[in-house]
Amino acid sequence: MTTLNIIPTRHIRRTDSGRIANTAWLGFMQSTFDELKTAPWTAAKNDILDTSLPVNDPLNFLSADDRYDAYRQSGNGANSRQVVYAGMACHTIKIPASAASTFVREVSFRVNADKFAVGGIKVAAMLSNTATPPAEWELCRRGGTDSAIDAGGKFATPEIENPDWGTIGILAETSKVRDGSENRTGVFALDLSAETAAWKYLHLVISMFSESAWRYEYFVEGSGMIDPQSIAITFDADGVTPDAPPTPPQPPVPIEMPIALGTLFGNEYMTTVAAPAQGGGLVNPSAPTAIMNLANGTIGEVLDFSTFGAGASVGLLASTPTNFMRNAIVYGYSSVAVGKKITGIKFPFAIYRPRLFKFRLAAYFINTPNLFGGLSNAKLHPDEYKDINLWLGRKASLKFLPITLTENIPAVCAYNEAMDVRFNGGGLLPFPSGAKMGYVPENPFLGVIFLLSIDSVTPPAEPYDSVDYMSWVSSGIVSGAVIQEP
């Protein structure tokens, strides 16, 4: 023989009386119990290990929690009115595949009951080939199989004769007053060996034994539960092993389309903006107010546009006699899946910490067919550099060079954020994936334009040298990608 502990799944039945006068409690205690006999089973939403007994509090019991197994309970009490709640549960165990040629000899389980459970608890076992709990009330109370209700009395917990209460179930509270009441627990075993066929499921149905037992007028009370971790099934054969846990479904893998930089769109361009020098290669503490400051709506004087390659510094730089602030425009492109939502970007940069300013990153998508095909030097028109709306991610169309592309081309700002990494601690900081953007490309070729600029500056109290002000470097380019839904 083999005995296994198998964690079940749970279904529940729930009914309630609606709001009634307290004086009608006795009739509704019985009618809600009757309604349980035909109520539908629903899958419990709570974790099976959170199964518990309700708190007996007629004033504050307000709903039928999925965690409760068998109960009847006065609740929502106020102004001489209440609601009578009732519930029951079914613990379902899937029989392991390795037991396909044997049968269940016995099932044991622990039941807990509170000290208000006058009338006691009933548990019945049913062997079945379906995962659905039994619908027929007699099966729920007496147990059996798919094909027959048990007539021998072994598939359900016993009924007990009590001189004061009559017929009661297991763990019944028999004291007439609460002062003598006790919470109870016990392990019970059901001999199922009379049924020697192999079945796929074992259902354990727990309910309150009595629909009419009560102790105090106006009070409907009492509950019981099966400890799901205590359920042990004994099979007639040796070597029965638990089924392997099901493999959890794997989430779909997002599509990552690499971003190529520079080649088709031309080189990487930057804007150079002048700032007064402190002298000796140091940055003037007042310089940030005179240069590009997106937060204050200023750009400053644009001196020139030039290419830069690997290792060139971008940001606020110190030199003599002029300090410079360089704002990068980096061009890239990617092949994309048409009709698949773009949910993020892996940015192809890394940065050094800027100590005294926030920088801004904006990314635009261009999805016009063949816009850059064969035009290796296509780049933004100089007029665009001077428009603060470009750097702030507000443009809906862009103008390009060469001259044949001076018309406005539709553009979508896919990412726009001011980032504060002043206290990052130094070293290279990879950009995270972008937020969910929801853009759906209509063409398989996607142009991506990245704009890196200083968003706002906190003037330093003392001059700083170029190392302190360095922001990002093109040598920090890493693998970038456009991320699309699966």
Image: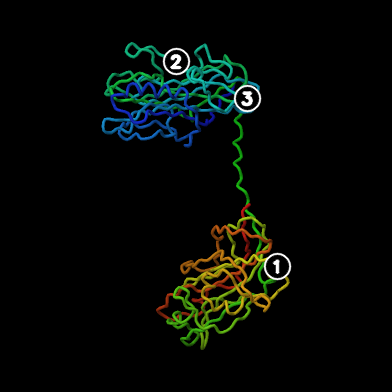
User: Relative to the observer, which residue lies in front, 441 or 105?
Assistant: 441
User: Relative to residue 327, is residue 196 depicted above or below?
Assistant: above
In the image, residue 332 lies at what x, y percent?
64, 68
For disc 1, the neighbor class at 10 Å (few under 14, some 14 to 19, many from 20) is few
Is residue 263 rendered to the left or right of residue 41? right
User: Relative to residue 187, is residue 390 depicted above or below?
Assistant: below
User: Relative to the observer, which residue lies in front, 462 or 479?
Assistant: 479
Q: Residue at x 52, y 66 (%)?
A: 416
Residue denoted by label 1: 370
Instruction: Please name the amino acid that badge 2 sits on.
Output: Pro
Q: Residue at x 38, y 34 (%)?
A: 63
- Tag of residue 359: none
The residue lying furthest to the right in this view is: 374
Residue denoted by label 2: 158
User: Relative to residue 368, is residue 44 depicted above or below?
Assistant: above
- Tag of residue 99: 3
The residue tagged with tag 1: helix, strand or loop? loop
For disc 2, the neighbor class at 10 Å (few under 14, some 14 to 19, many from 20) is some
The residue tagged with tag 2: helix, strand or loop? loop
Is residue 386 rendered to the left or right of residue 119? right
In the image, residue 406 lies at what x, y percent?
64, 76
In the image, residue 248 lies at what x, y percent?
59, 41
Instruction: Please name the amino acid that badge 1 sits on.
Output: Asn
